[in-house]
Amino acid sequence: MYPKTDPKAGVPASPDLPEVERRVLDHWAADKTFQASIDARDAGVDGANEYVFYDGPPFANGLPHYGHLFTGYVKDVVPRYQTMRGRRVERRFGWDTHGLPAEVEAEKQLGISTKAEILDLGVARFNDVCRTSVLTYTQDWERYVTRQARWVDFANDYKTLDLDYMESVMWAFKTLHDKGLVYEGFRVLAYCWRCETPLSNTETRMDDVYRDRQDPSLTVWFTLETGEKLAVWTTTPWTLPSNLALAVGPDIEYSVLADADGQRYIVGAARLAAYQKELGELTPVGTVRGAELVGRRYTPLFDFLADTPNAFQVLGADFVSTEDGTGVVHMAPAFGEDDQNACNAAGIPTVVTVDEHTRFTALVPPYQGSRSSTPTSRSRASCASGAWWCGRRRTPTRTRTAGAATPRWCTRRCRRGSWR
């Protein structure tokens, strides 16, 4: 397995480690040690002695980084251990050739930056540029991985652009569909309006992706059907036309205040000091717990979604706090994960009012075609709030449901079924 050495020669006081590495790698290549470790082990009846290892494929339109190299040892230790136990372990290397990395690189090469420009250029030509860019660094990858002392089969690699690979994915999806494990649904994701695509979970965990930005802050009064006005604070005023519910903390205490005309207002008791200027001469007349407000109906700010079933009611939610805001949360299920979960649990559907450009659709006629709106409010300010930024474009994202204009398919989990 290693080059033969004379044990009588001893160990040099200052060994030339790069030379040792070169000699070992050259010996493995000449001896075909890796392939011999596979050929020496029979697969067994129906592959009973095989150990199948799926190596998550990297993109090859960039050089390996520390993360690839750091996880590479795990991907080598597991199959090497199984080989030592006598199993036949074929380790085909793979290349991920689909997705945004290829598209962003193609945009750079073509000097374009929007979906409209891609359509003007032609999808076929754009795909050709993507295809040539995705395997740019395959030789560099092979050199890096080999120097890690990793054993993988580059000669028999697979690529996600291979027709047989794509057909296998389609077969798997059809099998899931035939078994009733596929459904069309919505999921709230960080969405880049420039790339017109959601950010992946991996991207949202990257360094410097989640950071503060300055956003407009509004405090809006919603009127309950019984006449009281609820103070609601939001840092996403552009979602107010999509409001379908309000949320309070069931155990939070709310102050009831009245003006000279007897009009009553409700604000989180712990937030009175923060809103002293806005509340002016209002007089405290009592308190109410959030649980007493749950189920109350209110008049929507806009009538765009007036026919939405079960909408425009106060919900109880444990994520509501009085650390900031008013203690009452505006709920737009298409633009917040907590909003969506709470509203859907109450039978309120997810209604998406923006398109893939994050422009309002015909569901919101006065603002159709615009990216944001600022409804009339009692109080307006500005605050710093956390948001995901697109690492590809260095632009702030917005959360929206990956659905409506671009339907998404989901798979049902934790459901038994026969795969025969």
Image (tube, helix red, strand yellow):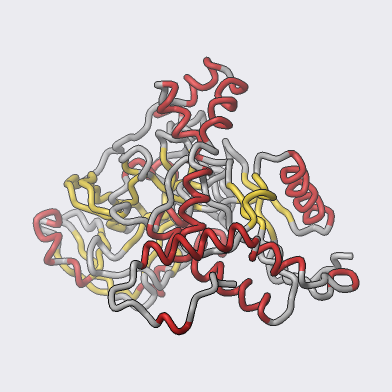
From the viewer's side, name the closer residue of 58 and 348: 58
Q: Residue at x 33, y 72 (%)?
A: 15
Choose top left, top right, bottom left or bottom right for residue 22. bottom left
Q: Quadrant of the N terminus?
A: bottom right
The answer to whether 411 is drawn above or below residue 45 in the figure is above
From the viewer's side, name the closer residue of 53 and 196: 53
Residue reaching furthest to the front: 8
Side (left or right) of 127 relative to 273: right
Q: Residue at x 47, y 35 (%)?
A: 196
Side (left or right) of 90 relative to 66: right
Q: Residue at x 35, y 45 (%)?
A: 391
Q: How far across and down, in percent of the image, does residue 214 sit?
A: 20, 46
Is residue 219 visible in this depiction of the protein? yes
Side (left or right) of 307 relative to 109: right
From the viewer's side, name the closer residue of 340 and 365: 340
Q: Residue at x 53, y 58 (%)?
A: 26
Q: How far across and down, in percent of the image, does residue 80 sit?
A: 61, 73
Is residue 366 visible in this depiction of the protein? no
From the viewer's side, name the closer residue of 42 and 259: 42
Q: How far across and down, in percent of the image, does residue 416 sit?
A: 79, 72
Q: Quadrant of the C terminus?
A: bottom right
Q: How far across and down, in percent of the image, does residue 418 sit?
A: 86, 68
